[in-house]
Image: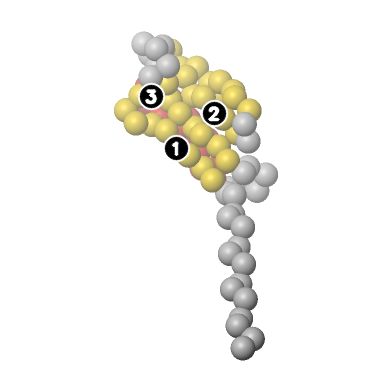
Amino acid sequence: MKYSLVTVINGNFKVEAEYQENKQGAFVGFHNKAATLWNASDVKTAMVKVVDENLDCVEGKMEYINHVQPDPEPEPEADTE
């Protein structure tokens, strides 16, 4: 079975690596890539996933990374009565 490490970083799709009969290597690559993206200041959003030849996620190895901060809630206006 062949495995691939795929990412979508700030909307850009990429096959990062391919692993022939090496699921453990794909999992190590997954964890390393996820850690790198969590620490990257230029990444707003990302998805990292290990997929098989059918593009199915392998053993739940996927992680969504989100560095986008929500807009702050406006302060309620004080009543001036």
In 3D space, how far apart are the residues under numbered discs 1 and 2 (Cα atoms)?
Answer: 10 Å
Q: In the rendered image, is residue 25 in sight?
A: no
Residue drawn at the location 39% of the way across and 12% of the way down:
54
Toward the viewer: 20 or 54? 54
Read off the residue under disc 3: 57
Q: Residues within 10 Å of mark 2 (few under 14, many from 20)?
A: many
- The residue to which callout 1 is attached is 63
21 or 74: nearer the eye? 74
Q: Are marks 1 and 2 in contact (CB under 8 Å)?
A: no
Residue at x 58% of width, y 41% of height: 45
Residue 15: quadrant of the picture = top right
The relative height of residue 60 versus residue 21 in the rendered view (above or below) is below
The amino acid at mark 3 is Cys
Compare residues 79 and 2 and report the one nearer the observer: 79
Q: In which quadrant of the rendered image does the C terminus lie?
A: bottom right
Question: Which mark is first along the chain, 1 or 3?
Answer: 3
Residue 58 seen: yes
Label 1 SS = strand
If you read the primary sequence from the N terminus, does the residue marked by circle 2 or circle 3 appear first? 2
Q: CA distance from mark 2 to mark 3?
A: 12 Å
Quadrant position of residue 66: top right
> Which amino acid lies under the numbered mark 1 shown in the image of this protein?
Glu
Pointer 2: what residue? 7
Residue sitting at the far right: 42
Q: Percent x, y for residue 22?
A: 39, 18
The local secondary structure at tag 2 comes to strand
